[in-house]
Image: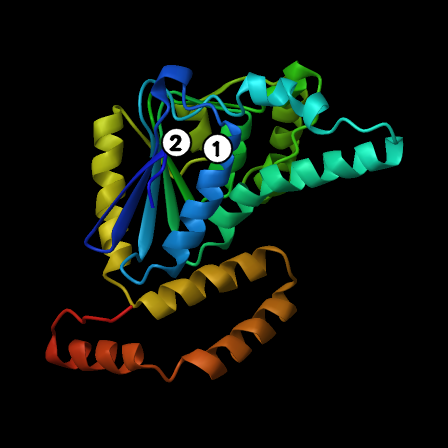
Amino acid sequence: MQYEFLQITIADHVAEVTLNRPDKANAFTETGFREIQTAFAELDRNDAVRVIILSGNGKHFSAGIDLELLLSIGDKTAESCDGRKREKIIDLVKQLQAPMNAVEECRKPVLAAIHGGCIGGALDLAVACDMRYCAADAYFCIKEIDLGMVADLGTLQRLPKLISPGLVNELAYTGRNVGATEAEKIGLVNRSFETKEAMLETVRQIAAQIASKSPLSIRGTKQVLLHARDHSVTEGLNHIALWNAAMILSEDLSAAGMAAVMKKTPSFRS
């Protein structure tokens, strides 16, 4: 597909998805939201793709939701009946949540490579990814509090699963910036790098390593990890028992075992 807001390349089983509205700090328009949802659904179905890198062109990863889109919500939900107006607002919020959900629900691991600002809605997108890496100039902000609103696209739901709830509270209430060093220290990102180039080099190496593993096992591991995040240990153990009962007797298991015996690198089909 042709995209207006995104650039997408695929090589060696790795897809690179780049936010591409640099003149507007990659702020999300209605088209941008729609394209993110469509792209990740397409990449989920694409057998040539085993792992995805998400980054941004220009000075920033993304400034979040475009203010013009934010200010148009009143017009988009205009309705004489209060009940129907509230219903439209709920529908609109769910439409904007859907792209973030599509990133999380994509069966392929998504690695966010962040530089510059990761603000508001961009943080919603970043925390929906499986892993986050950043350059030294990166900063993160739950900006919605400064706009007189409550963040509603996933940060307040996903971030407490990643870092201390007390820190989440502080960031959500104050809207302060978290720089790269602090982001690494508190576990918001896996690692920080001096430059964007150094970050992308390492992230591509990690992506290549993931792409070399059994695609079936990688997809299963992501699904099981997400299930474990939201369920008890007992529920998680029951879930993985059922998963492996269904999936473990695969070609990939045989290929990996044979390669280990022969001391060779296994190859897998998607």
The reply to whether callout 1 and callout 2 are in contact (CB within 8 Å) is yes
Quadrant placement of the C terminus: bottom left
Q: Is residue 256 left or right of residue 215?
A: left
Other-residue count near label 1 (Cα within 10 Å), few / some / many at <14 / 14–19 / ≥20: few
Picture quadrant of residue 98: top right
Answer whether residue 53 is visible to the viewer in this image. Answer: yes
Helix, strand or loop for disc 1: helix
Q: Position of residue 203 (x, y in %)?
A: 27, 41
Amino acid type for the residue under numbered disc 1: Thr
- Describe residue 110's horizontal placement relative to residue 100 as left or right: left
Colour treatment of the image: rainbow
Question: Image height check: is 235 above or below 70?
Answer: below
- 155 left or right, relative to 201: right
> Is residue 137 among what the camera can see?
no
- For the image, the number of numbered tags is 2
Q: Say which residue appears at 30% left-offset and 56% top-offset.
A: 49
Residue 188 picture location, percent across and down: 48, 35
Residue matched to label 2: 5
- Of residue 110 and residue 72, the one placed in the foreground of this image is 72
Q: What residue do we see at 51% from left, 18% from top?
A: 177
The residue that label 1 is drawn on is 31
Is 88 situated left or right of 244 in this image? right
Q: Residue at x 45, y 59 (%)?
A: 222
- Cα–Cα gap, marks 1 and 2: 7 Å
